[in-house]
Image (cartoon, rainbow, N blue to C red):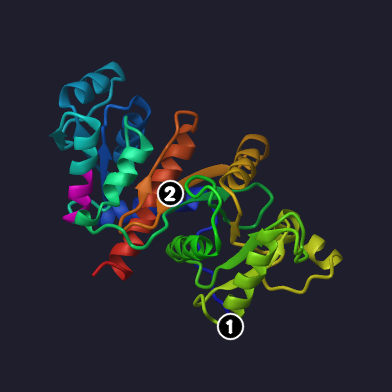
Amino acid sequence: MIDNSRALRSAGEIIDRAREIGWSKPMKLAVAAANDRDVLSAVVEARMERIVEPVLVGDKEKIVKTAEELSLDITGIPIYDIKGEAEAAAKTAELAADNEVQIVMKGFLQTSTLLKTILKPEYRLKLHNTISHCAVLTVPGYHKLLNITDGGMVLEPDLQQKLYIIKNAVLVSNALGIQKPKIALHAASDMVNPHMPSSIVSAVIAKMAQRMQLGDVLVDGPLTLDCALMPGVAIYAGIESQVAGDADVLVVSSIEEGNIISKAMINFGDAIFAGVVVGAKVPISLVSRTDSSMHKKASIALSVVLADYICRYHRK
């Protein structure tokens, strides 16, 4: 019997959990090139709510000016005065490598600059060959959190990359209190089709999971979106599965696929978004200018919950 009674079930519960962590042992978050207006606003708000303890890295003059323009109080927040995007990324990676911070966040610099720096061998922050993005959504009408992956990092994952994507998603699920996550491998059809390579990859992965090659998880696929999330559709389709209609994680076959599904749920289904990049020894938080204040707060909170879990169970 799987006991997921203590699993977090909404963005609000993720934020509440992050606050609990913050009051007992605050997670430190380093912002690379912290003069980004939206990011600086988000971390200052998160600091006020005791969700996270920020550390700012970048051009101090620009950071202070940005804070003044936005009327943000950054008194007491450590600032590492580092000129240049690459240099700010390097200092942020160094802080993470030295366990000075438990979360890394992208500021006013290219995502590729930050990720390439963090994954350099000298920082020893790389866990394996694939980092991936988890979009953890609170979807109105769905009875629990839904993690859609990967709609942000891997363009078109092959079988090996999908296995790493699943591993990253399982880590996030476990941090959210889901002991044995149910993972649906998304496809356009519930049937294995020799003309659809992704359906064959899904079938292979599902068989690997059945033979306990993927650890303590439940995996099924190929499954369509409605079959993965709606029990009635699964029953109508005659699919007997512990995953169908009750998925915790939806693994997609391309970055476009994941991006479209996530944004459709957010923009047209009023889903609340919390996103994090996984696969390094520290969570990497990326927020967009188009993200609402709630989405930014939920994303930072998700990074805190994941960082706390990594520190307690995975960090040597």
**Range of the magenta residues?**
92-98
Q: Is residue 265 magenta?
A: no
Q: Quadrant of residue 190?
A: bottom right
Q: Decide which of tag 2 and tag 1 comes sooner along the chain.
A: 1
Residue named by callout 2: 276
Residue 239 placement, left or right of 97:
right
Task: Characterize the magenta stretch by its predominant secondary structure.
Answer: helix
Residue 87 visible at all: yes
Circle 2 — which element?
strand
| Image location of residue 9, percent across then percent down | 55, 57
Crowding near pointer 2: few (<14 within 10 Å), some, many (20+)?
many
Comparing labels 2 and 1, the label whose residue is closer to the camera: 1
- The image quadrant where one finds the C terminus is bottom left
Residue at (82% x, 67% y) in the render = 235
**Quarter of the figure with residue 280:** bottom left
The dot on residue 211 is 1
Q: In the image, what residue occupies the spot 43% across and 44% down?
A: 299
Q: Identify which amino acid the numbered label 1 is placed on.
A: Arg
Q: CA distance from mark 2 to mark 1?
A: 30 Å
Question: Judging from the image, what secondary structure is the residue with disc 1 in?
Answer: loop
Amino acid, disc 2: Val
Viewer can see residue 56: no
